[in-house]
Image (cartoon, rainbow, N blue to C red):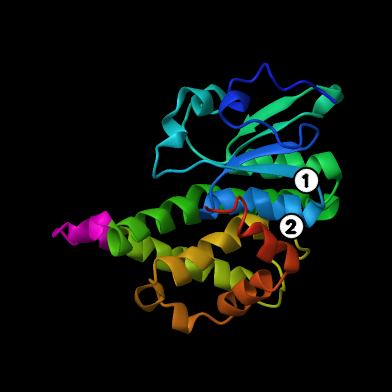
Amino acid sequence: MNNLSEYPITRRWPPRRPGAIQLYSLTTPNGVKVSIALEELGLPYDAHLVSFSTNDQMSPEFLSLNPNNKIPAIIDPNGPGGKPLALFESGAILIYLAEKTGKLLPAAQRYEVLQWLMFQMGGIGPMFGQLGYFHAFAGKEIEDPRPKERYRAESERLLKVLDAALEGREWIAGEYSIADIAIAPWLRSLRDGYKATDIVGWGALKNTPAYLDRFLARPAVQRGLVQPPRP
């Protein structure tokens, strides 16, 4: 077992299971990607709540692990070569966990999985997130309609791209993968969190609503969606 005391973050969030992957996160669309992957992969992990309400993400301890002050981040005590590995950025973490276990990144579809993972990281995440801000949060007080319309239209376009790619497929790259784990939590937030389906053409989509329902029905997904637990 490797000693994690050299990481300042462990002084604020002491490991409860020092031999397990230490996850620093919150149940946002980006945060649950990693907890869901850990549940799907059956990897032991120790989930620590990084609360935005108390600006935990801006604390020196958290910034020592992720200078970009975003969740999620991890420390794997048993990283490459048996040495601890600290890692941030949800997409990078998903790739690492898949390669560590040899699961959720099938060799035959490797680059297709990665392309859809990048589609989420560069498109769905940023666009849906901005739409949520202007539709459901503080941005809705801005009178100028152009910012919201920019993100609404792009979110609708991205949904159409996704919906077409899902035609005849259960999962986005054929086999269930980290690409699905990246994409589906954002669909859930768009539908259930931002309640924006009525403005992005959700009702006209042929494949995406059932795709999201399939994803949410998975037991590992249901477990991962509530990690780390909120007080």
Q: Residue 175 sits in which quadrant?
A: bottom right
The magenta-colored residue range is 138-149
Quarter of the image for the N terminus: give it.
top right
Looking at the picture, which amino acid does disc 2 mark? Ser
Mark 2: few, some, or many residues within 10 Å (few <14, many ≥20)?
many
Mark 1: few, some, or many residues within 10 Å (few <14, many ≥20)?
some
Q: Residue at x 83, y 51 (%)?
A: 103
Q: Residue at x 65, y 48 (%)?
A: 34
Looking at the picture, which amino acid does disc 1 mark? Ala
Residue 141 magenta-drawn?
Answer: yes
Picture coordinates of residue 172 (x, y %)? 67, 65
Residue 49 magenta-drawn?
Answer: no
Q: Residue 83 sits in which quadrant?
A: top right
Read off the residue under disc 1: 98
The answer to whether residue 144 is visible is yes
Read off the residue under disc 2: 177
Along the viewing direction, whichever of 168 and 211 lies nearer the viewer: 211
Helix, strand or loop status at disc 1:
helix
| In the image, residue 78 above or below residue 222 | above
The answer to whether residue 173 is visible is no
Helix, strand or loop status at disc 2:
loop
Picture coordinates of residue 145 (x, y %)? 18, 62
Q: Residue at x 74, y 57 (%)?
A: 177
| In the image, residue 186 above or below residue 163 | above
Task: Tell me, yes or no, whether the two marked residues, 1 and 2, touch with CB atoms within 8 Å.
Answer: yes
Along the viewing direction, whichever of 141 and 211 lies nearer the viewer: 141
| In the image, residue 75 above or below residue 210 | above
Q: Residue at x 62, y 43 (%)?
A: 91
Along the viewing direction, whichever of 124 and 55 lies nearer the viewer: 55
Q: Residue furthest left?
A: 143
Left or right of 40 on screen, residue 73: left
